[in-house]
């Protein structure tokens, strides 16, 4: 009986987590779609997750859609904190396990902020802010003792996270997370190709964002820092920029698909 209780899934957490993955996927897909439009010259723009929410609220029934996405993001946040605190994946309490669980918690706080933005937009407020939050908090930290070292360290960690995304994309770990045995072999290959492409594209973006922070630290200049939108702008400004931006934009759409695939096929340990 005890063994059955341990492995019995918490249905409401499971459903919230899966709904959360879908909401996160929609946000990434919108960012990618807007960037792809910019790359091919048919409108669109390079933006970040908050910009994607602002675009969604402009659509028909946008406030209702934003409310649903906010609920999903809250579910994703709850799941991240469950992973950090209850450790359903048994990451353990060694250095590696603690680092992963801290990462889950940080991710939870980040998406809690995005969920709050979605709620404000759904309620008809908070959509006209032009401030650059990345540069704002970078400036605050740089003004503190050892601020340059801290920002530089965060930049290095984000680049390391980007390389970890590459490792995930091309290792067997990605496949093990998904229970896609019900799909045919060609379908499994297509699904995994799209998922790997999406995770790798996210790794590229992380590396660029990390480099921005290192530049901000070494130059003691918070305006050098940038988030997802600045990373996409930087790609667009390179030689063959529209091609680079278009490839990464497609990758972000693919990452959105990967989130939906996770929502459907992920083996969540919600005990």
Image: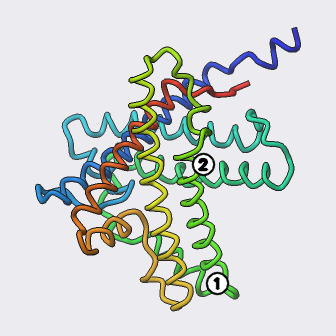
Marks 2 and 1, how far apart in space?
A: 24 Å
Residue 223 marker: none
- Above or below residue 4? Residue 131 is below
- Above or below residue 149? Residue 30 is above
* Residue denoted by label 2: 108
Callout 1: few (<14), some (14-19), or many (20+) C-alpha neighbours within 10 Å?
some
**Snapshot quadrant of residue 83:** top right
Residue appearing at x 55%, y 55% in the figure:
110
Report whether 37 appears left or right of 183: left
Which quadrant of the figure contains the N terminus? top right
* Residue denoted by label 1: 147
Residue appearing at x 37%, y 42% in the figure:
254
Report whether 200 appears left or right of 35: right
**Snapshot quadrant of residue 159:** bottom right
Query: Residue 122 placed where, x, y %?
Result: 35, 43
- Residue sitting nearer the eye, 122 or 68: 68
Looking at the image, the residue that sits furthest to the top is 1
- The local secondary structure at tag 2 comes to helix
Residue appearing at x 53%, y 39% in the figure:
74
Report whether 260 appears left or right of 125: right
Query: Residue 173 placed where, x, y %?
Result: 62, 39
- Above or below residue 13? Residue 149 is below
Callout 2: few (<14), some (14-19), or many (20+) C-alpha neighbours within 10 Å?
many
Residue appearing at x 61%, y 32% in the figure:
176
Query: Residue 231 placed where, x, y %?
Result: 38, 68
Looking at the image, the residue that sits furthest to the bottom is 219
Looking at the image, the residue that sits furthest to the front is 185
**Snapshot quadrant of residue 13:** top right
- Residue sitting nearer the eye, 65 or 200: 200
């Amino acid at each position: 009986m005890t063994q059955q209780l341990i492995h019995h899934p918490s249905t409401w957490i499971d459903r919230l987590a899966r709904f959360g993955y879908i909401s996160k996927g929609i946000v990434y897909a919108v960012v990618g779609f807007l960037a792809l439009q910019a790359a091919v010259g048919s409108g669109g723009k390079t933006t970040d997750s908050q910009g994607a929410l602002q675009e969604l609220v402009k659509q028909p029934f946008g406030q209702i859609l934003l409310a649903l996405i906010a609920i999903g993001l809250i579910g994703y946040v709850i799941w991240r904190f469950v992973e950090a605190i209850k450790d359903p994946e048994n990451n353990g309490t060694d250095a590696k396990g603690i680092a992963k669980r801290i990462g889950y918690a940080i991710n939870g706080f980040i998406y809690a902020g995005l969920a709050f933005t979605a709620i404000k937009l759904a309620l008809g407020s908070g959509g006209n802010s032009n401030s650059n939050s990345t540069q704002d908090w970078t400036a605050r930290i740089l003004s503190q003792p050892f601020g340059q070292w801290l920002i530089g360290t965060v930049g290095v960690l984000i680049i390391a996270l980007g390389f970890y995304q590459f490792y995930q994309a091309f290792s067997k770990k990605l496949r093990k997370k998904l229970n896609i045995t019900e799909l045919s072999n060609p379908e499994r290959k297509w699904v995994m190709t799209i998922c790997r492409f999406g995770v790798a594209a996210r790794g590229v973006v992380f590396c660029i964002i990390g480099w921005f922070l290192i530049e901000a630290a070494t130059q003691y200049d918070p305006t050098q820092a940038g988030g997802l939108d600045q990373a996409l702008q930087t790609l667009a400004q390179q030689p063959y920029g529209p091609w680079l931006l278009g490839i990464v934009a497609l990758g972000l759409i693919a990452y959105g698909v990967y989130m939906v695939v996770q929502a459907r096929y992920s083996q969540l340990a919600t005990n």
